[in-house]
Amino acid sequence: MAECECLAKCPFFHDKMANKPATSQIMKNQYCLGDSTGCARHRVFKAVGGQHVPGDLFPSQTKRIRKIIADIRKA
C-alpha cells in the first residue's frame, strides 16, 4: 500500500488524533494508506499548498474543499 506523502507530518493525526490511536488507525487506513484522493486535507494540500489546510479540517469533510480553495485563490 502506498502511503500519503503528507502522513508523516500531518497535524491532524499527530495533534488532534494523538490520544485516539484506534480511531486514528481506522482513518489512516481509509484516507492515508493507498488512494489518498478521498482525503479532504490532501486535496486542499494538492490544490493550494499545505499551509492552507485548515487545522480543523477532518479528512472526511470533502464538502468544505470547494469553499476553502476558492477563498484562498481569491486572496
Image (tube, rainbow, N blue to C red):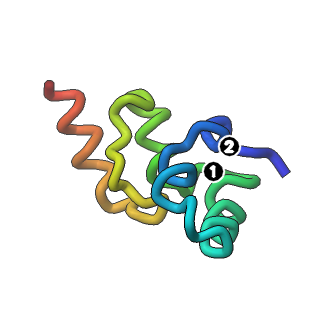
Q: Amino acid at mark 1?
A: Ser
Snapshot quadrant of residue 50:
top left
Q: Residues within 10 Å of mark 2 (few under 14, many from 20)?
A: some
Residue 75: x and y, percent? 14, 25
Label 1 sits on a secondary structure element that is: helix
- Residue 73, above or below 14: above
Secondary structure of the residue carrying numbered label 2: loop
Q: Which label was assigned to residue 36? A: 1
Residue at point 29% right, 56% down?
Answer: 64
Instruction: Name the spot of residue 52 as percent of width and height, x first.
Output: 33, 33
Q: Nearer the viewer, residue 14 or 7?
A: 14
Residue at position x 66%, y 36% from top? 5
Residue wearing tag 2: 4
Mark 1 neighbour density, 10 Å: few (under 14) some (14–19) many (20 or more) = many
Asked whether the residues under the numbered discs 2 and 1 touch, taking CB atoms below 8 Å apart as contact, a structural biologist would say yes
Is 73 above or below relative to 40? above
Residue 67 or residue 54, whichever sits in front: 54
The residue positioned 53% from the left and 62% from the top of the image is: 17
